[in-house]
Amino acid sequence: MKQTTCIGWDIGGAHLKAVLLDAQGFVLAARQVYCPLWRGLHELERAIDEVLSHFNAGCHAVTMTGELADVFSSRREGVAGIAGVLAAKLGGQVQYYAGRHGFVDPGAVGAHAMDIASMNWLASVAYVAQHCRHALFVDIGSTTTDIAAILDARFLVAGFTDADRMQHDELVYTGVLRTPLMALAQKITFAGHMTNVAAEQFSTMADVYTLTGDLTLEENMTETADGAEKGMNGSAGRIARMIGRDAQDAPMPAWQQLACSFKDAQLAQIRQAVFRQLSRLNGRRDICLVGAGVGSFLVAELARQLRYEYKAATQFITAANDETKKMAAVCFPAYAVGYLAISRAGAVE
């Protein structure tokens, strides 16, 4: 039976993302909620309640990466635990995205737990492949970067598990919010001199992109490393600690320049992985880089550097307004899995 509306859910370890679509795939609403799942399933329950207080539907399509949270002893346990919460919270029809196996009903979650685990990237790629015949899809989130080649409207990837995707640079553990700066460089340039970087989580990339102006405070939902304020002054203080200094030791432009150096280090890390995937496309230039996620601004920058056409995920989304469209692009796997579910039901023309 066709549903008039459907919610696509992407349940991560740090954020819950939900997108409400009508029967034609038009985005009615989109929402991201901070959800530190490592603290327990009660955080997921709270985040779901927050979403459902704003919108609901009779059809739900679910994808996830939250099973990786260390509150679970294994991915299989994580999938089961998350599915248990959803069974208690969601009414109507619920289906889970199991990657190459398509959608499965709740009763089949146990048998398909490892197919469901961390398959949100494939939902996104399957959707983009309907709109771009040749592309490199890059989704930069708060914690990780997903990269997948599309050739002749079909995904061209080497791995389907996190382990295989990490081995082949299709999953890179770097993001624009939660990644600690010590993961990007052991040495960095400051005031014309090379200096060591502290092997301590004094600061994260959210501080970097606050200082560079690439992220607004509204886009930064994660907690700071020291629990203090997220603005320019707080970010400067935290990034200064990474090189053994205090914010008072230099003017703000110096800390902004240091932030740019860390940004360059992250861009280099992602660029190396992008080069590896571009090699799968035989050096062809008639492809576009498709950017999604809260860090899509980095994908646009990489496209400029490499001289490829850039397309934002927002170009493939129809929504009530630009703000809703932008949030749906941040929550792109949730949008994609919802759209795929509706399309499967034959509702999208």
Image (cartoon, grey):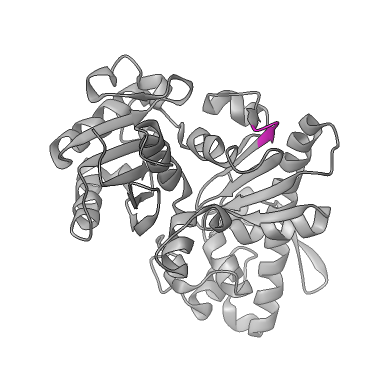
Left or right, residue 135 beside residue 222: right
Q: Position of residue 226 (x, y in %)?
A: 42, 64
The residues colored magenta run 149-153
Q: Nearer the viewer, residue 264 or 239?
A: 264
- The number of discs equals 0
Is residue 187 among the parts visible in the rendering?
no
Main secondary structure of the magenta stretch: strand
Residue 178 is situated, as x and y percent measured from the top left of the image, at: 49, 54
Q: Image point 47% across, 57% down: which residue? A: 318
Tell me which corner region of the image, top left, top right, bottom left or bottom right, holds residue 284.
top right
In the orientation shown, which residue stands out farthest toward the front?
349
Task: Report the side of 221 relative to 178 (left or right).
Answer: left
98 drawn magenta: no
Image quarter (top left, top right, bottom left or bottom right) of the C terminus: top left
Quadrant where the N terminus lies? top left
The residue sitting at the top extreme is 111
Residue at 64% from the left image edge and 49% from the top image edge: 290
The quadrant in which residue 81 appears is: top left
Q: Is residue 149 above or below residue 22?
A: above
Q: Position of residue 337 (x, y in %)?
A: 41, 39
Q: Residue at x 38, y 42 (%)?
A: 338
Q: In terms of depth relative to the viewer, which is nearer, 281 or 171?
A: 281
- Residue 288, given in percent of the width and then of the height, sits at 73, 48
| Relative side of 134 to 25, left or right | right
Q: Judge whether 301 appears above or below 186 on screen.
A: below
Residue 315 visible to an observer of this rendering: yes
Q: Which residue: 68% across, 54% down? A: 266
Position of 226 with respect to 253 (left or right) is left
